[in-house]
Image: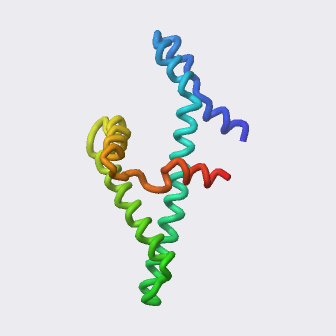
Amino acid sequence: MQDRKQLLKLDISIFEKNGKSEFAQLVKKNKLRTTRALNDFLIGMKNEAADTKEASRIILKFISQQQISKDEEQHLKTQVSNVFKMVGIGIPFVLIPGATLLIPVILKAAEKKGIDLCPSNFKKNRIKDSKG
């Protein structure tokens, strides 16, 4: 376990030696922020996978029994909406070079227009609830 932690440690001295000290300072400065953002993303993906699994269970129940409860129906609608949002955000990410820089801009612009493009599992309140 100790060896694995050593592999995850970022050695930025290479950048400092190659005259990229400004970049090294930027990485050091934003290390905690980046780690938190990555952690939030991974938690969101984990929650999204669990919700998708639950939605597939609901679909199978509907196919076999021809009925589902109102709560299950609402969960299914929400999850289908989240999947479409993820696909909508994912397409530019895959097709357009540099789209990783565009995604936050697109999300902010849509938010200003009253359009919610962020899947529910990636919203801050849901992520905080799942942490404990």
45 left or right of 118 in image? right
Q: Nearer the viewer, residue 111 or 98?
A: 111
Coordinates of residue 88 in the picture (x, y in percent): 31, 53
Residue 107, by quadrant, is top left
**Image height check: is 56 above or below 84?**
below
Can see residue 44? yes
Q: Observer-nearest residue: 26 or 68?
A: 68
Q: Which residue is located at x 33 percent, y 50 percent? A: 114
Q: How many marks?
A: 0
**Residue 11's spot in the image, x, y percent?**
58, 23
In this rendering, the answer to whether 56 lies above or below 42 is below
**Which corner quadrant of the image does residue 126 belong to?**
bottom right
Residue drawn at x 48%, y 79% as measured from the top left: 70
Residue 42 appears left or right of 113:
right
Describe residue 6's horizontal placement relative to residue 81 as left or right. Answer: right
Image quadrant holding the N terminus, namely top right
Q: Nearer the viewer, residue 22 or 124?
A: 124
